[in-house]
Amino acid sequence: MAEKNVTFTGQVTLPAVGQGTWYMGENARLRKSEVDALRAGVERGLTLIDTAEMYADGGAEEVVGDALQGGLRDKVFLVSKVYPWNAGGKKAIAACEASLRRLKTDYLDLYLLHWRGNYSLAETVDVMETLMQQGKIRRWGVSNLDYGDMQELFRVTGGNACATDQVLYHLGSRGIEYDLLPWCQQQGMPVMAYCPLAQAGRLRDGLLENHVVQDIAHVHGASAAQILLAWVVSHQGVIAIPKAASIAHVEENAAALGITLSPDELSRLDKAFPAPNRKTPLDVV
């Protein structure tokens, strides 16, 4: 089975499908199933887990922390994100330490600025370097930064050490293909795609129910969601982080790694959902 991998900072190679945790930790009754799903994902090779201090006000980090008990931490590439208003100086140190406590670990593999705020990019880069020196994080990156933001970041001293940009990306939202994605690929910088199946709602339904997506799914003996995931990770250097709150859903996501779309299938999807031919604002949810 051909599987797709993405390399972070030339050091760590991971499967191109990870695990997202947005909306986890919001309902105590779901805690065990969320923990079980994350653990099942790691067992099936989905070893990147993405979370944030924002998700359920730290509740998602606590779920992840529970899931990593029993020796799983060393098998996981752990990602969390800092609020923009915490992304500088002592506030960033305190925010990172609080995330580590909730996650029951002493380091993050990757720490991201969740989106731009009042702290300058220079201040954020400076504190990320401090956190690396303190051993609290292994590398840092950003989220929801568009092409222009990334150019600005790379003009900051140390800004080119950024390990990733995490942005919204799916078949129905292809704006990053105009400039951001090609530039990141040129830099050898992975792009992390959140909401790779689109958010719940009419757009998601339209993608899953589209006849081209359905036809291709039928050929592969797969679900429409698996085809959407396979499309996202068919792009060089892109890792998808779908949320899966059940073991069955995790198994479905993991199996998408084994689906390789043919040039003809990619062309049909491209025709059904064309990329914009001009600059568009970065989609954010």
Image: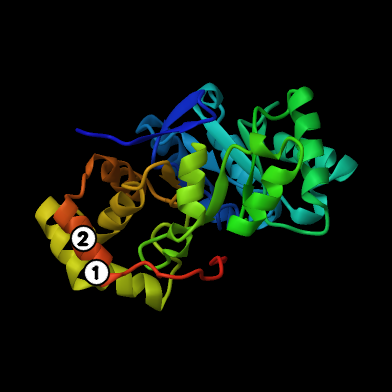
What's under tag 2, amino acid-wise? Ser
- Above or below for 16 versus 166: above
Residue 9 position within the rendered picture, expressed as x and y whole percent measured from the top left: 54, 29
Dot 2 crowding, Cα within 10 Å, few <14, some 14–19, many 20+: few
Residue beneath the point at 55% across and 50% down: 166
The circle on residue 267 is 2
Residue beneath the point at 36% across and 52% down: 232
Q: Quadrant of the C terminus?
A: bottom right
Q: Secondary structure at mark 2?
A: helix
The circle on residue 271 is 1
Label 1 near label 2: C-beta < 8 Å? yes
Residue 182 position within the rendered picture, expressed as x and y whole percent measured from the top left: 45, 50
- Above or below for 20 versus 204: above
Mark-to-mark CA distance, 2 and 1: 6 Å
Res 284 → quadrant? bottom right
Q: Secondary structure at mark 1?
A: helix
What's under tag 1, amino acid-wise? Lys
